Amino acid sequence: MTITSYPFDSQSVTETDYSRLFREFQSTGVADSLGGTSFYTYADGTGMTVKVNAGFAIIRGHAVYSTATEPLTIAAAGTSARVDRVVLRLDPAANSITLAVLTGTAGSSTPPTPTQTDTGIYEFPLATVAVGANVTSIAAGAVTGERKFVGNTVGGWTTTTRPSSPRVGRLGYNSDTKGWEFWNGTAWTDLSQAVSWSTVDGKPATFPPSSHTHLWADITDKPSTFPPAAHTTDWSTIVNEPATFPPSTHSHTWSSITSKPSTFPPSTHYHSQYLESGDTISWANGSKRPYSNTATDGTWYAVWVEGSGSFCRNTSARKFKENIQDFEIDPETVLKMRPVIYDRKDKVDEETGELKPGRKGEVGLIADEVDELGGLEWLVQYMDGEVDALRYDLLGVALLPVVQRQARQIEDLEGRLAALEARLS
């Protein structure tokens, strides 16, 4: 017979018949509100186990009821991670609905597919479990729930747990999208009808905002600075303006200065009694003050001019000296020095380019000749490794042994002359 009807009195009705009947009254799922704890699966990090809360569910027209939390053992993953799946397994042949763990494939992130037949074994997913490589406990974050919930005429679900392929018109609230949706035969559709702006009647042309305020902290994309827009201000409206406007410290490049003169003749000025920075004097003039001054009463000192241009006193007292010892000077070498008369060479002025004639008829010594005599190097001054000048102030010291020798000779001759005169008298 191709047509079966049931249940009637004195009629044999099979388990399959009742399952087919009851599944029309209620879809497969957990009998709980969205977010409830019925058959909720979780882990607490206490070993390789997950736990399933007590609850009530309907699986393909069959009921299952649990009164206590059930622990399930998760096999270790070894060196390759995998994803397992926790299910409620309907087995009509065994007349039972039990909890079971479907072990995933090593190295895969895809959980195993549950078995779902019409009259045989039907596995209802509760959660997936990510099993890390070499882990010894299951962390709370490794469990992801995937329960679906039963409903009466209106259901409640998430995008993941809403019924798959229900009857056309099935209605429910989706907590993920925060909206009502229904099954149109091929897809879940938002219950709210789309309205285009062009179809709205009586809408205003503009929407002026009502009087309101905003906290500064609530304003976004505000600039960090507010440069003023181009504008002008009457001088009379400015308050507290200074009486004068001294320029701030600044500098100008030489090229930016206009109308500058081509030459800069010095203004009338004078110099202090000593050489100043940048001053020059003639080699034969000595210092400026001795050159221009007439000696008067008072204390006077011989001075030296250092290579840096500084003046210093020529001191000779014992208190300024140490390591004092005799210094032998060969009178014969001193007598070999040759006095000469000479002209200084003409010189070109470095600033003006003008040829300046050198002084003529100067009397003195040639430093090179004194240096070549040997033994009188202490009279010679050197510059950059070459003979440069003589210490004329030390010539008196060089002449002392000559004079002393002559004094001794005179004394000896006077003695001899006195002896001769005495003998002849």
Image (spheres, rainbow, N blue to C red):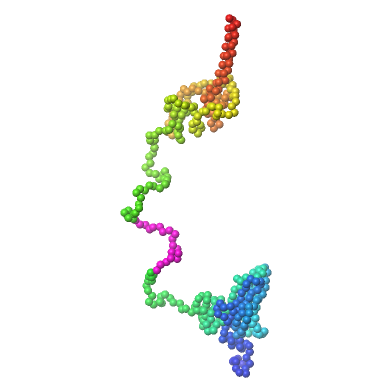
- Can the viewer see residue 55 in this picture? yes
Picture quadrant of residue 333 = top right
Q: How many marks?
A: 0
Q: Position of residue 245 (x, y in %)?
A: 36, 48
Name the one closer to the observer, 315 or 217: 315
Q: Is residue 192 left or right of residue 113?
A: left
Work out which quarter of the rendered image holds the N terminus and state it: bottom right
Q: Which residues are magenta?
A: 212-232
Picture quadrant of residue 380 = top right
Name the one closer to the observer, 52 or 20: 52
Work out which quarter of the rendered image holds the C terminus and state it: top right
**Majority secondary structure of magenta residues:** loop
Q: Position of residue 280 (x, y in %)?
A: 45, 32
Relative height, residue 303 to residue 53 (above, below): above
In the displayed orientation, state which residue is furthest to the bottom. Answer: 10
Q: Is residue 387 left or right of residue 240?
A: right
- Can the viewer see residue 115 in this picture? no
Q: Is residue 41 magenta?
A: no
In the displayed orientation, state which residue is furthest to the top. Answer: 425
Q: Position of residue 410 (x, y in %)?
A: 57, 14
Name the one closer to the observer, 224 or 317: 317
Q: Residue at x 59, y 75 (%)?
A: 145
Q: Residue at x 64, y 74 (%)?
A: 50
Q: Position of residue 273 (x, y in %)?
A: 43, 31
Picture quadrant of residue 195 = bottom left
Q: Residue at x 67, y 69 (%)?
A: 136
Q: Is residue 218 magenta?
A: yes
Relative height, residue 28 to residue 222 (above, below): below
